Amino acid sequence: MSPPDRQREILIATGNPGKFREIVQVLATEDRRVAVRWRSLPDLTRTIPAPAEDGRTFPEIAALKARYYAGASGFWTLADDSGLEVDALGGAPGVISARYAGTPEGTPRAEVDRANNRRLITALRAIPSEQRTARFRCALALSDGENVLATAGRRRGGVDYRRTARQQRVWLRPPLSRALPGLHDGRVAVRGEKPPQPPGAGAGAGCASSFPSS
């Protein structure tokens, strides 16, 4: 294969190493005329404070983050925003999925996720399974600091959960792999957790995307 004509550096606006790896794997191709060096927020030489996510929709927030980090870093920036909308909860958690429990600023991410999970499970407990219809939404935006290219998608399903003394799990059913070929086990699960595996699932099966996002 001939060498690429040039290399562009693109910042993926996340400090989550797992999300960074997943995005790079999805975007990587074998035949690329423009080579890309992907960077994450921890790769930068200085810490950039997070912007206020005051948009009203997932695309608005993704675009806001992409433009903000591109302007602050000098790199083209790819940012995302995603979350769960439960119909019986009036669309909650929605755009505040990552802040649903209202934990204090500075709380470790793992604790925030656990608190979000607890609040969601508590809210779902009184809702019959057949009424737990929901949507997982995700928006992506790429910006050079001024212009923004954005896209968004959604997956409908139902919300299930499992709560034990040691862990809490929330996931979207049915498996996304039925509608999106190429996903090995494409169910949407809460960040840091994997949904219960179907019979015969291999050890490598896991969540295709995460809730909430940041």
Image (cartoon, rainbow, N blue to C red):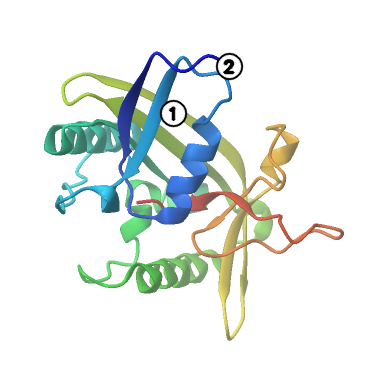
Would you say 185 lies left or right of 33 here? right
What distance separates the C-alpha of mark 1 from that of mark 2?
Answer: 33 Å
Q: Looking at the image, is mark 1 or mark 2 nearer the viewer?
A: 2
Q: In this view, does 61 lie above or below 105?
A: above
Q: In this view, does 99 lie above or below 60?
A: below
Answer whether labels 1 and 2 touch (C-beta < 8 Å): no
135 and 147: which is toward the camera = 147
Give whichever of discs 1 and 2 has the lower sequence position. Answer: 2
Q: In this view, does 197 lie above or below 35?
A: below
Picture coordinates of residue 54, whole percent (x, y): 19, 43
Residue at image position (49%, 59%) is 191
Q: Can residue 65 be seen in this view?
A: yes
Label 1: which residue?
Answer: 152
Would you say 142 lies left or right of 55 here? right
Are there few (<14), some (14-19), or many (20+) residues within 10 Å of tag 2? Answer: few
Would you say 33 lies left or right of 145 here? right
User: Which corner quadrant of the image does residue 160 belong to?
Assistant: bottom right
Picture coordinates of residue 101, whole percent (x, y): 34, 67
Residue 122's label in the rendered image is none
Label 2: which residue?
Answer: 1
Element at label 1: strand
Residue at image position (39%, 55%) is 16
Name the amino acid, label 2: Met
Q: Is residue 160 above or below residue 133?
A: below
Would you say 52 lies left or right of 90 here? left
Are there few (<14), some (14-19), or many (20+) residues within 10 Å of tag 1? Answer: some
Residue at image position (71%, 39%) is 177
183 and 60: which is toward the camera = 183
Element at label 2: loop
Q: Can residue 84 be seen in this view?
A: no
